[in-house]
Image (tube, grey):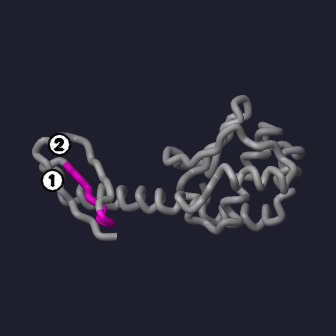
């Protein structure tokens, strides 16, 4: 993706990015160092790359299909989350809300599906008990997906 950096004397602290005609425009303060500029360009390229990857998924339809296939409850809502840095997904059983980390969107579909199933299972069982793992194991590729995610976690 082509990137154009615009320095602004009016911009004091914040960095902003947007795509215009297929070009990523990154606006930065005029006094930012070259190292800071490189950092923020990289951050914005990654952020927009994740947004592009998430656009390919209809999470609501995907969750409904997986809930039916695995005999799990459907969520009240499911959405991508840019804020999740260490979790693959999270669930609030009381509200039925599920969030999936945007970085997961770049993984194979069967891994994304596993993360969704994992969170759907939490709607029924909030902990990681044997009963919970029995629900998750209804997804045929659960063991393979867990191995994939363990490899991606770098031991975290």
Which sits in the foreground, 125 or 60? 60
Residue that numbered label 1 is attached to: 7
> Height in image: 132 above or below 24?
above
For label 2, the residue is 11
Which quadrant is home to the N terminus? bottom left
Q: Is residue 22 magenta?
A: yes
Magenta span dominant secondary structure: strand
Secondary structure of residue under mark 1: strand
Q: Which residues are magenta?
A: 21-28
Instruction: Name the residue located 54 percent from the left edge and 46 percent from the top edge.
Output: 81
Mark 2 near mark 1, Cβ–Cβ under 8 Å? yes
Q: CA distance from mark 2 to mark 1?
A: 8 Å
Q: Is residue 135 above or below residue 13?
A: below
Mark 2, secondary structure of its residue: loop
Left or right of residue 32: residue 128: right
Q: Position of residue 2 (x, y in %)?
A: 29, 70
Please name the residue shown 64% across and 52% down the image. 59
| Residue drawn at (30%, 53%) of the image | 17
* Residue found farthest to the top: 94
- Circle number at residue 25: none
116 relative to 3 in the view: left or right: right
Quadrant of the image occupied by residue 44:
bottom left
Q: Is residue 32 left or right of residue 122?
A: left
Q: Position of residue 100 (x, y in %)?
A: 61, 49
Question: Which quadrant holds residue 24?
Answer: bottom left
């Amino acid at each position: 993706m082509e990137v154009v950096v615009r320095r602004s004397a009016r911009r004091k602290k914040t960095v902003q990015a947007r795509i215009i005609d297929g070009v990523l425009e990154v606006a930065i303060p005029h006094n930012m160092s070259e190292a800071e500029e490189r950092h923020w360009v990289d951050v914005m390229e990654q952020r927009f790359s994740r947004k592009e990857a998430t656009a390919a998924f209809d999470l609501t339809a995907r969750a409904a299909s997986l809930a039916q296939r695995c005999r799990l409850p459907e969520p009240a809502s499911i959405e991508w989350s840019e804020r999740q840095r260490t979790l693959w997904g999270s669930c609030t059983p009381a509200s039925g809300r599920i969030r999936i980390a945007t970085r997961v969107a770049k993984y194979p579909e069967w891994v994304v599906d596993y993360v969704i199933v994992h969170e759907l299972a939490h709607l029924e069982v909030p902990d990681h008990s044997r009963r919970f793992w029995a629900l998750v194991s209804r997804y045929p590729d659960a063991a393979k997906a867990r191995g994939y995610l363990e490899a991606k976690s770098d031991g975290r």
